[in-house]
Each structure stands twice: as structure tokens, then as C-alpha cells.
Image (tube, rainbow, N blue to C red):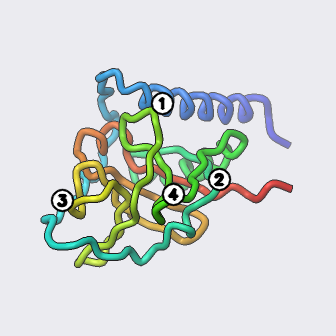
Amino acid sequence: MISSAHARTIANLAAASCLALLLGACGGGMSLPSFSSSSPPPEAEPGTGPEMPASIRADEIVGRWGLASFQNPADRARTEAAARAQCKNPYVITAGSSGGVIMHLADQATPQELRLKGSPSGKNYIGPAGPTPGEQDREIVSFDGRVLITRFIDKDAATRYGNMVYVRCAPRA
């Protein structure tokens, strides 16, 4: 049985996560400080040559996802649980008309079609057409079919959004 204090803590965490996502989506130019030590965003690989195919297909990430984020790697498990709790109001990734996926770029209110892109180092990225990795891309840090973790390449967006955790929601019954 869950105590009312524990339920209240979970509800407060969910509300704070939703508020953080809503404030981040506003894009009002306000940047909140990071209150935890976190690993720096990845160094950008030099963009060269034509786009390489990603080892992750677009259809593998299409679906309904609970979404949350963390700065401190020690918070990953807790953040995955918070993301799972967001499935009642999921972030929906749909297939694009050109073989990509429909998602939001950092600070953009309107989703657009993004590509899954590979790199010579074996890393995968999600972003608009162009050099890999581009400033608007996000690196796919990990993906196991159920949990997708991404981090924005742009240092400012990476600082504001942290590591984005997407947890696949169960299919509707």
C-alpha cells in the first residue's frame, strides 16, 4: 500500500516534470541554471561528407512515449520511472512522409520531420538534414527498444534539457 506522503511525493515529481517540459517548450529565452553536476555534452564530431544511415530505423522509435529528463546520471533510474508515469499524457513520435520521424527540435513549438543519421564513429543522431552532428541534432545516447535516451548537441539546449528519457508506453488495451 502506498502512503499518502509517498503518493504526494510522486505527484509533486510528476507535476514538476510536466512544468519543466512546458517551460522548456515556451522558448522564452529564459535559461534556468543547472543545480547538479553533470557530464558535459558530447563534443561535436566534424561534419563531413554525405549522411550515413543510422543503425536505428525510424520505425523503431515511432510510438507513444513517456518523457522526462535528468542532468545527474545517478538520477537515471528515478527519471525512467517518472517518464513511465507520463504515459497517461504521452509524447507521440509519428512516421514522417520522407522516412524520418516527426519530433520537436529544441525550443520549437511545432514538430517537424527529422532524420535518423549515423556517423563514422558509430553514433546515431536525430535531426534535420545536414551535417552530422549538426547544432540542432540530438545524439542517441542509448536505445534498447523500450528506453530511448538522447542529448542535444547544442551546448545551451543540452544544459537546459539535460538527458531526455523516453520510455515506451504500453499499447492501448
| Number of residue marks | 4
According to the picture, the residue beneath numbered tag 4 turns out to be 96
Nearer the observer, 128 or 87: 128
3D distance between C-alphas at marks 4 and 2: 15 Å
Tell me which numbered mark, 4 or 3, is placed earlier along the sequence: 3
3D distance between C-alphas at marks 3 and 1: 26 Å
Quadrant location of residue 108? top left
- Mark 4 or 3: in front is 4
Callout 4: few (<14), some (14-19), or many (20+) C-alpha neighbours within 10 Å?
Answer: some
Q: Where is residue 20 drawn, in percent x and y? A: 48, 30
Horizontal side of 90 relative to 25 (left or right) equals: right
Helix, strand, or loop for circle 3? loop
Tell me which numbered mark, 3 or 1, is placed earlier along the sequence: 1
Quadrant holding the C terminus: bottom right
According to the picture, the residue beneath numbered tag 2 turns out to be 64
Q: Where is residue 58 drawn, in percent x and y? A: 50, 67
